[in-house]
Amino acid sequence: MSVLIFTEQSNGAIRKSSKEALSYGAALAIQLGVKAEAVVLGTIHQDLSTLGTLGVSVVHHCADEGLNTMDTRRYTAVLSEIASSIGSQVIVFAHSMTGRAVAPRLSVRLKAGYISGATGLPDTSKGFVVRRNVFSGKAFMDVSVDSPLKIISVNPNSFGIKEQEGVAVVKPFQTSIAPGRVLVRETKKVTGQVPLGEAELVISGGRGLKGPEHWGMVEELAGLIGAATACSRAVADAHWRPHHEHVGQTGLAIAPNLYFAIGISGAIQHLAGVNRSKVIVVVNKDPEAPFFKAADYGIVGDAFEVMPKVIEAGRQLKKG
Ligand SMILES: Cc1cc2nc3c(=O)[nH]c(=O)nc-3n(C[C@H](O)[C@H](O)[C@H](O)COP(=O)(O)OP(=O)(O)OC[C@H]3O[C@@H](n4cnc5c(N)ncnc54)[C@H](O)[C@@H]3O)c2cc1C
C-alpha cells in the first residue's frame, strides 16, 4: 500500500509544482500510515535520491527517452503499470497542464475516483473527503470519494513545499509500453526568459497599456527584478503579446510570490488564473477596477505616470 506521486520534470529538473505534490503526498502517506513513493519519467539530470528530503522513501524512475516528451496516452499506460505493480491506494499529481491531461485519463483506466484541484489534505475521519476550488476560486466544494483507488491533483501554492532530512531509494523501472499513436516531431520552448509557470515574480500588462509598443516598461521592470512577463487574454487576443503569456481561466494558472498587474481590469476569468499569488499589486487608473478587491497593494493612477517612477525605484534598489 502506498501513496504514489507523479513527479514532473522539465529539462531534467523536478518542477516546483511537483515538489509541492511530493510534500502533499508524503503528508497524506503519514496520515494513512502507508509509504510515499514517487515516479519520475524520462531523462533526469539530478540525483533522485534527494527527493527523500520531500518525504518519499522510494523513487521509481523510468528513464526511457521516449518519455521526455509528454504523451498523455503513454504516460497513462506507464503510470498505470507502476501504480498497479506497487499497489498504490492514492495517486497524487500537481494540478498542472500535464496533471490535468493525465490524471483524468488514468482515473478512467484504473476506475479511480478523481478529485481535481485539491486545496488541502483529505479528511479521513469519515470516509475520504477532499476540499477543492469551484467557480474559478469563488467557492469551494467538499468531495467524498469511495472508490478503493483515488487520484488527487493538488492546486499550486495550496499546500507548500515541506523539506526535511531524508534519502530515497531509487528503483529503475523498465516499460514495455510501445510509443503512443501521437508522434511529437518537435517541441519549441521559450528560452532566455523565466518560465511563467515556475516564476516567483510576474509582471503583467493589460489593455490599459494601449498597445504593444508600450511593453518596454513591463519588460524593463521584469528584467530589473528577474521576473517573468504575463498579460491578459484581451492583450494576447489582440496579438500584442504571445499567447503563452496569457494568464487566467483559459490561459495559464500561476501562483507566484508576486503578481504585479498593470492596466488590467481584474475580470473574474483573469483572477481565476492569478488569485493564488501570494502578493498582488495592481496599478489601474480606475479606482473602481475590480482588481483592487483582490489586491494586497493598489496604486490608483495612470500607468504611464506611475510605472516610470516604479522602474526608477527598481533601478535605485538594484544599484544598492
Ligand atoms: C469564457 C471566457 C474566458 C476568459 N478567459 C480569460 C483569461 O483566461 N484571462 C483573461 O485575462 N481574460 C479572460 N477573459 C476575458 C476577460 O473577461 C476580460 O475581458 C479580460 O481579462 C480583460 O482584459 P484587460 O483587463 O486587459 O482589458 P480591459 O477590460 O479593457 O481593462 C483595461 C483596464 O486598464 C485600465 N486602464 C486603462 N488605461 C489605463 C492607464 N493609462 N493606466 C492604468 N490603468 C489603465 C482600465 O481602467 C481597465 O481596468 C475570458 C472571457 C470569457 C468570456
Image (tube, helix red, strand yellow):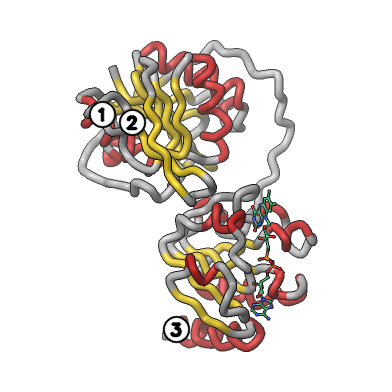
Disc 1 marks which residue? 124
Disc 2 marks which residue? 129
Q: Residues within 10 Å of mark 2 (few under 14, many from 20)?
A: some
264 or 192, which is in the foreground?
264
Residue 232 location, x and y as percent? 66, 61
Task: Please tell me which of labels 1 and 2 falls first in the chain.
Answer: 1
Q: Residues within 10 Å of mark 1 (few under 14, many from 20)?
A: few
Residue at 65 percent across and 52 percent down: it is 190
- Of tags 1 and 3, the one toward the viewer is 1
| Quadrant location of the C terminus in the rendered image | bottom left
Disc 3 marks which residue? 317
Residue 49 location, x and y as percent? 31, 34
Q: Quadrant of ligand 1?
A: bottom right
Q: Secondary structure at mark 3?
A: helix
Q: As displayed, is residue 132 above or below residue 230?
A: above
Q: As displayed, is residue 19 above or below residue 245?
A: above
